[in-house]
């Protein structure tokens, strides 16, 4: 285990927290940390391992669009904590999260690499995706980055886009699939199973009354998956998700009395879990089974849950 922090807040505070070794830095938003992103991250890791340097990444929070175009801000696939976890799993030694401010947005493209070098004096190489843009007004491109790299003695690597089914993998494509409930495509584009994280709260115990006790997990991400029923796996925070079950994500139209309640994830596991109110859990979303719907009676809801449980079991059995 490294003796320095794996998640560092702020570019200006990064250098004193990193070891006295060459820094190989991946730069980008990395929302979703999908297969295309990992080509960039892993290139930095390979260079660092080959030369005995530090593999790091610089990412941003919030998404630049939230500051620059709040009326059409990008809805993020995942919160910062899950994104950072996925980036570290790619082999990075450290992730630096830079708050995206108006001052940072105002840095001219021609000065961007110099700003990085000033903040990270041991910076040796920079890794980005081939379509990455940077600097004020997004005026910087790979050609400029290469030119700046040559002038400052920094090596620049741009990873080509990765395709799936002949179409480039992108965060935009993943968001669209997530909203449509196409979890098979979402997970194929990510290269791992889509994950949420939440804390169990006390519910109204309706599921237990119906014979299907649930873990109630309030969860309102920016980019919401399609409301409906999913085959899922659950685990404690920091653990692998191994407990299989079925979950409903949505506003519970059959039993909810509020006009516009926040969506909630209700998970019924096939075996009694060792989780209680207050437990921090991760949920891996494996497959979309059906859309959320309103039932005329509680009996109809119970019958449907029985069928959903069976469908989820069949999915896990392959």
Image (tube, rainbow, N blue to C red):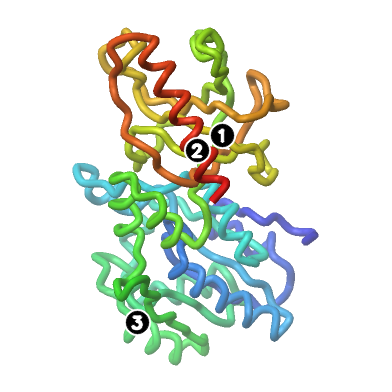
**For mark 1, does the 10 Å Cα neighbourhood hold few (<14), some (14 to 19), or many (20 or more) residues?**
many
Give the quadrant of residue 81.
top right
- Ranked by sequence position, the earlier of labels 3 and 2 is 3
Disc nearest the viewer among 3 and 2: 2
Disc 3/disc 1 C-alpha distance (Å): 46 Å
Mark nearest the camera among 1 and 2 is 2
Dividing the picture into quadrants, the one containing residue 29 is bottom left
Q: Residue at x 55, y 45 (%)?
A: 316
* Residue at image location 40% in from the left, 75% down from the top: 162
33 lies above or below 109? above
Q: Nearer the viewer, residue 22 or 271?
A: 271
- Give how far apart the Cα atoms at labels 1 and 2 are: 7 Å
Image location of residue 204, percent across then percent down: 50, 8
Please provide percent x and percent y for residue 145. 38, 82
Horizontal relation, residue 143 to residue 315: left or right? left
Label 3, secondary structure: give it.
Answer: helix
Label annotation for residue 142: 3
| Earlier sequence position, callout 3 versus callout 1 | 3
Secondary element at tag 1: strand
As drawn, the label of residue 245 is 1
Residue 45 sits in which quadrant?
A: bottom right
Which residue occupies 65% across, 26% down?
A: 279
Mark 2, residue position: 312
As measured in the structure, the alpha-carbon distance from the residue carrying label 3 to the one carrying label 2 is 46 Å
The residue nearer to you, when weighing 49 against 70, is 49
- Whether the residues at callouts 3 and 1 have beta carbons within 8 Å, the answer is no
Q: Nearer the viewer, mark 3 or mark 1?
A: 1
- Give 99 or 291, whichever is nearer the viewer: 291
The spot of residue 211 in percent (x, y) is 55, 14
CB under 8 Å between discs 1 and 2? yes
Q: Is residue 213 left or right of residue 145?
A: right
Question: Residue farthest to the left?
Answer: 71
């Amino acid at each position: 285990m490294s003796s320095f922090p794996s998640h560092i807040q702020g570019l200006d505070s990064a250098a004193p927290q990193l070891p006295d070794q060459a820094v190989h830095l991946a730069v980008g938003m990395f929302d979703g940390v999908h297969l295309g992103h990992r080509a960039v991250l892993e290139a930095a890791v390979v260079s660092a391992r080959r030369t005995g340097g530090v593999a790091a990444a610089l990412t941003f929070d919030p998404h630049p669009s939230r500051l620059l175009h709040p009326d059409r801000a990008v809805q993020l696939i995942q919160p910062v904590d899950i994104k950072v976890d996925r980036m570290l799993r790619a082999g990075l030694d450290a992730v630096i999260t830079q708050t995206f401010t108006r001052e940072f947005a105002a840095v001219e493209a021609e000065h961007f690499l110099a700003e990085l070098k000033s903040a990270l004096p041991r910076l040796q190489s920079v890794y980005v995706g081939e379509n990455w843009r940077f600097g004020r007004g997004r005026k910087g491109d790979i050609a400029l980055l290469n030119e700046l790299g040559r002038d400052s003695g920094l090596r620049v690597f741009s990873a080509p886009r990765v395709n799936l089914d002949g179409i480039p993998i992108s965060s935009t494509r993943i968001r669209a699939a997530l909203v449509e409930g196409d979890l098979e495509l979402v997970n194929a584009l990510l290269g791992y199973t889509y994950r949420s994280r939440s804390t169990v709260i006390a519910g109204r115990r309706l599921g237990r009354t119906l014979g299907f006790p649930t873990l109630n997990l309030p969860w309102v991400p920016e980019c919401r998956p399609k409301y409906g029923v999913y085959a899922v796996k659950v685990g404690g925070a920091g653990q692998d998700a191994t407990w299989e079950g079925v979950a409903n994500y949505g506003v519970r139209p059959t039993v909810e009395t509020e006009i516009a309640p926040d969506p909630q994830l209700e998970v019924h596991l096939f075996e009694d879990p060792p989780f209680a109110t207050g437990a921090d859990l991760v949920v891996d979303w494996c497959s979309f089974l059906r859309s959320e719907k309103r039932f005329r009676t509680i009996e109809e809801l119970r019958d449907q849950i029985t069928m959903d449980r069976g469908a989820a079991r069949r999915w896990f059995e392959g």
